[in-house]
Structures are given as C-alpha cells and as structure tokens.
Image (spheres, grey):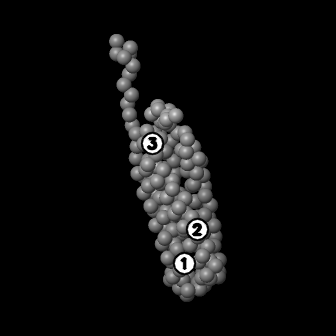
Amino acid sequence: MQKTEQQLRGIGGWLIPFAICLVVLPINLLSAYAKAVHVFEFPAFQAHVSADPSWKALSFLETTAVAIAALLSIILIFLFFLKNPAFPAAYSLFVGLLIAKAIIHTYLVFSIPVTTQAFRNGILLRAVQTSLFWGAWCAYMLRSRRVRLTFTRRIDPPPDSALG
C-alpha cells in the first residue's frame, strides 16, 4: 500500500533516526574537538609538530574543520526542524565538506613518515566509514519522496466551504 502525499509530509519514517543523528552530531563534533585540542597539547605531539610541518597542518585541520562542522550542524538542525526547503541542499554541501575533511585528513596522516601502518589503517577505515555513512544519508536526502514532500513549501488551498 502506497502512502499518500499527506501521510509522507512531516518528520516520520527514516527521517526519525536521521533527526536523532542530526541532534547528536554537534555533541559528537564538540567532543571530538575537545579530544583533538587535548591531544595536540601533549609534549610528544609538540615535538613532532616542530619536526614535520604536516603535523601542524593536521592539527589545524582537525581543530578548525571540527569547530566549523559543529557550527554548521547546529544551523542544519534549525533548517531541519523548520522544514526549510534549503535543508536537503545545505545538508548535501555539509556532507561534501565532511567527506573532503576525511580525505584531506587521511592524506595528511599518510604523508607523515613517522605514523605507523596500524595508525594509517585506522584513519583510512574511519574515512571510508564516514564517507559511506554520510553519503548514504545524503543519497536519501536527495532521492526520498518523503524528504521532497517534507522540505517543500506548499500552501494548501483553503477548503471550498471557507471561500464562502
């Protein structure tokens, strides 16, 4: 049985777990930011930064990109719950930024000669997982009928009896 347009409008179906992910996202990002800033303060890390400029680029990327992503995710939450028509496109751009950050991060880690193969593999796995997870949600945002109906401004005409 196919649902009607009216039944598909609104936050329901797969938009419910998506909404949960979206609300938790800034918390996860800020937690990652706090961990990244803390790690970059270790004396051992500071020694690596002075020896190889790639470490400095990596620390800058981590702290800056995660802080920007946290701010953008808060904006996305507002767009989502206001059912703003710009949300699917804004979300797709956000996912593109997250994937670009993962690719740049992976490249920087692989360009640092002192990183171990196990560390590199862990970073590569995390980049692939991030890309697949966010990419799947992005595909849903761009192709779902529910999303199209929920994030489209439509002014329903008043019932005939209201016209007098």
Which of 111 and 44 lies nearest the eye of the viewer?
A: 111
In contact (CB < 8 Å): disc 2 and disc 1: no
- Residue 69, relative to residue 77: is it above or below? below
Q: Secondary structure at mark 1?
A: helix
Quarter placement of the C terminus: top left
Q: In the rendered image, is residue 164 in sight?
A: yes
Residue hosting label 3: 145
Name the image quarter holding residue 39. bottom right
Residue at 54% from the left image edge and 83% from the top image edge: 112
Assess disc 1: are there few (<14), some (14-19) or many (≥20) residues with their C-alpha within 10 Å of its C-alpha. many
Pointer 2 residue: 126
**Among the two numbered marks 1 and 3 on one chain, the one whose residue lies closer to the N terminus:** 1
Which one is in front in this view, the residue at disc 2 or the one at disc 1?
Answer: 2
Q: Which residue is mark 1?
A: 109
Task: Point out the frontmost of discs 1 and 3.
Answer: 3
Instruction: Give the percent coordinates (x, y) of residue 71.
Output: 50, 56
* Amino acid, disc 3: Arg
Tell me the quarter of the picture where residue 30 sits.
Answer: bottom right
Q: How far apart in space, not on screen, are marks 2 and 1 (Cα)?
A: 12 Å
What residue type is disc 1 on? Val
Viewer-side residue, 58 vs 120: 120
Callout 3: few (<14), some (14-19), or many (20+) C-alpha neighbours within 10 Å? Answer: few
Q: Residue placed at 55% from the left, 48% from the top? A: 18
For disc 2, the neighbor class at 10 Å (few under 14, some 14 to 19, many from 20) is some
Disc number placed over residue 39 in the picture, else none:
none
Give x and y (percent) for residue 127. 54, 68
Q: Earlier in the sequence, mark 3 or mark 2?
A: 2
SS category of the residue bearing label 2: helix
For marks 3 and 2, give the one nearer the viewer. Answer: 3
Q: What amino acid is at disc 2?
A: Arg
Q: Position of residue 17 (x, y in %)?
A: 59, 47
Mark 3–mark 2 distance (CA, rounded to whole Å): 30 Å
